[in-house]
Image: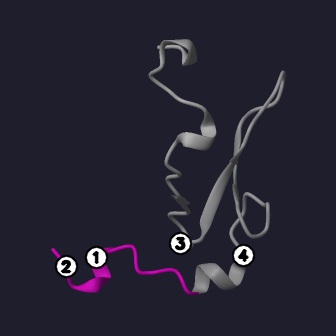
Amino acid sequence: MTPSDGAAGPAAHRSRIPLICPRCGREQRVVPGGPGRAVKVVHAGTGREACEPGDLARAPDDGGPDDGTV
């Protein structure tokens, strides 16, 4: 499908679906790539790909075997 067939409207009319970091839970955004550059996903607050160390300390439990679930 192409934008000219009406399936995907202009970016201003699309619903914004937030990207949430699976490691720290903070909002992320996509930085478009270009010729010779890959698309990146960065944290919205810092503009960095890496999580802040303090955010990782507050991250929710990942549901590993130590939490009592089966």
* Color encoding of the figure: one colour
Q: Nearer the viewer, mark 2 or mark 1?
A: 2
Q: Earlier in the sequence, mark 2 or mark 4?
A: 4
Callout 1, which amino acid?
Pro
Crowding near the residue tagged with mark 4, few <14, some 14–19, many ≥20 C-alpha atoms within 10 Å: few
Q: Which residue is mark 1?
A: 65
Estimate the spatial distance between the alpha carbons at disc 4 and disc 1, rounded to whole Å: 25 Å
Mark 1 element type: helix
Residue 23 appears at what percent x and percent y? 54, 68
Q: Which residue is mark 2?
A: 69
Tags 1 and 3 in contact by the CB under 8 Å rule?
Answer: no
Tags 2 and 1 in contact by the CB under 8 Å rule?
Answer: yes
Q: Earlier in the sequence, mark 3 or mark 2?
A: 3
Q: Nearer the viewer, mark 4 or mark 3?
A: 3
Residue 52 got which mark?
4
Estimate the spatial distance between the alpha carbons at disc 4 and disc 3, rounded to whole Å: 11 Å
Callout 3, which amino acid?
Gly
Residue at 49%, 53% (x, y): give it: 17
Main secondary structure of the magenta stretch: loop
Residue 63 appears at what percent x and percent y? 32, 74
Residue 44 got which mark?
none
Q: Which residue is mark 3?
A: 25
Tags 3 and 2 in contact by the CB under 8 Å rule?
Answer: no
Q: Is residue 54 left or right of residue 68?
A: right
Callout 4, which amino acid?
Glu
Q: Nearer the viewer, mark 1 or mark 3?
A: 3
Estimate the spatial distance between the alpha carbons at disc 2 and disc 4, rounded to whole Å: 28 Å
Crowding near the residue tagged with mark 1, few <14, some 14–19, many ≥20 C-alpha atoms within 10 Å: few
